[in-house]
Image (spheres, grey):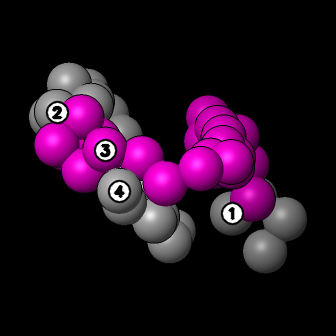
Amino acid sequence: MEGACHLYTHIKTYVHTFLHPIDEQLFENFLRTMPDTIYRIKGYISFK
């Protein structure tokens, strides 16, 4: 199992906390600009 952990050293994480509801259209536009190398985005978002 120790060798399997080595396969994932290239993974990076980022956490962002929005302090206020955000504009849904601007967020969707932002998501469309994400590179194909983004594997997963998840979370809860409050929209205006």
Distance (Cα) linking label 1 and label 2: 36 Å
Mark 4 Cα shell of 10 Å, populated few (<14), some (14-19), many (≥20): few
Name the residue: 75% across, 59% down: 5
**Furthest residue in direction right, as rendered:** 2
Instruction: Name the one closer to the observer, 40 or 42.
Output: 42
**Which residue corresponds to mark 2?**
29
Identify whether 13 is placed above or below 40.
above
Instruction: Name the one closer to the observer, 29 or 37.
Output: 29
Mark 1 Cα shell of 10 Å, populated few (<14), some (14-19), many (≥20): few
Name the residue: 35% across, 56% down: 48
Amino acid on which the number 4 mark rests in the picture = Lys
**Which residue corresponds to mark 1?**
4
Name the residue: 46% across, 64% down: 45
**Which residue corresponds to mark 4?**
48
**Which residue corresponds to mark 3?**
23
In the image, which residues are magenta?
5-28
Q: Quadrant of the N terminus?
A: bottom right
Distance (Cα) linking label 2 and label 4: 15 Å
Mark 3 Cα shell of 10 Å, populated few (<14), some (14-19), many (≥20): few
Label 1: which secondary element? helix
